Image: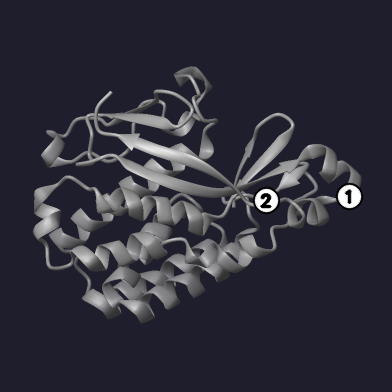
Amino acid sequence: MIVRDDGHHLVCIHQDEHARLSAACYREWADPIIEKKIWNERLHTAIVEHDRAWIPLDTHPIWNEEEGRPYDFTNYPEREKIAAYQTGINETEMMDEWAGLLVSRHLHSFFAQIRTDAAEAFKAEEQKRWERLRGEEESDDEKRALAVLKMCDELSLFACMNHPGARKEEEVPWFRDGFSMRFDFLNRQNVMPSWKNEEEIVLTPAPLGDKVQFPLKLRRVSKESIRDDGWKIAYDSTPIATQVVTFLTTS
């Protein structure tokens, strides 16, 4: 779950919905080299399915008593999250082995600096998966595809985690200085996002060949209803709403 505080409401977005926005960005990816790759559609599978692990968890989101808000993807209990990740990777691998490899690599990277027993066991198991699926060495295609997956993930996270129309100083810190990935077709420039208004996001330089407009599904859960009725009732009784997100190629 992605959760942002909008004052009187908690805005809740399912991770799988965020992944579908990521995949919509990939459909307009402007790198001509990627477009010609025979694994183009396999990468789409990895991007659209990269957060399928969260589908059952987000169906019944749980309350974090210590923080006074629901758990989100950054602080969900580790063992339960890892178990879900493994299921999600397994399911993606069933659809396409190379997509499963990319999702494994992507989720594994989140634990690079975490040394708990559960994290170490997860990383070791996933490394065995890599060797089973492609041997010990990372190919150039795998490296290139993983970078695109990460970029599309970050584009969607920027839209989901920030208040629509946020000024630069109001944005979540993660992407204020641009996104983490750089690409040859953009001359290795740092891609900077900025809100043009409450719907449109400008990317400079633009990694997308055409604008992306996406109806993002979410719930705006009233804090008053949470206080009065409890988290579960408040969440379940909140109707699904739509936030239109548009990535522009020019300002």
- The quarter in which the C terminus is drawn is top left
Given residues 130 and 248, the one toward you in this image is 248
Toward which corner of the image does residue 93 lie, by quadrant? Answer: bottom left
In-front residue for pair 151/159: 159
Residue 228: image location, x then y, percent: 90, 44
Asked which secondary structure carries label 1, the reply is: helix
For the point 41% across and 46% down, which residue is it? Answer: 214
Question: Which residue is at 16% across, 63% downward?
Answer: 139
Query: Residue 9, position in %: x, y?
Result: 71, 36
Q: Is residue 2 left or right of residue 187?
A: right
The residue nearer to you, when weighing 203 against 89, is: 203
Q: Residue at x 22, y 39 (%)?
A: 207
Q: Position of residue 68 (x, y in %)?
A: 78, 42
Query: Label 1: few (<14), some or many (≥20) within 10 Å?
Result: few
For image coordinates 45% across by 20% down, the residue present is 168
Count residues near mark 2 (Cα–Cα under 10 Å), then give few for <14, some for 14-19, many for 20+: many
Report the coloring of the rendering: one colour
> What amino acid does circle 2 point to?
Tyr
Secondary structure at badge 2 equals loop
Residue tagged 2: 71
Q: Quadrant of residue 179?
A: top left
Q: Is residue 155 left or right of residue 166?
A: left
Residue extending farthest to the right is 228
Q: Which mark is residue 44?
A: none
Q: Quick one: 234 or 51, which is closer to the camera?
A: 234
Work out whether mark 2 precedes mark 1 in sequence or the reverse, and give the earlier one.
2
Mark 2 and mark 1: Cα distance apart in space: 18 Å
User: Where in the figure is residue 22, as x and y percent of width and height?
Assistant: 37, 51
Q: Which residue is mark 1?
A: 229
- Amino acid tagged 1: Asp
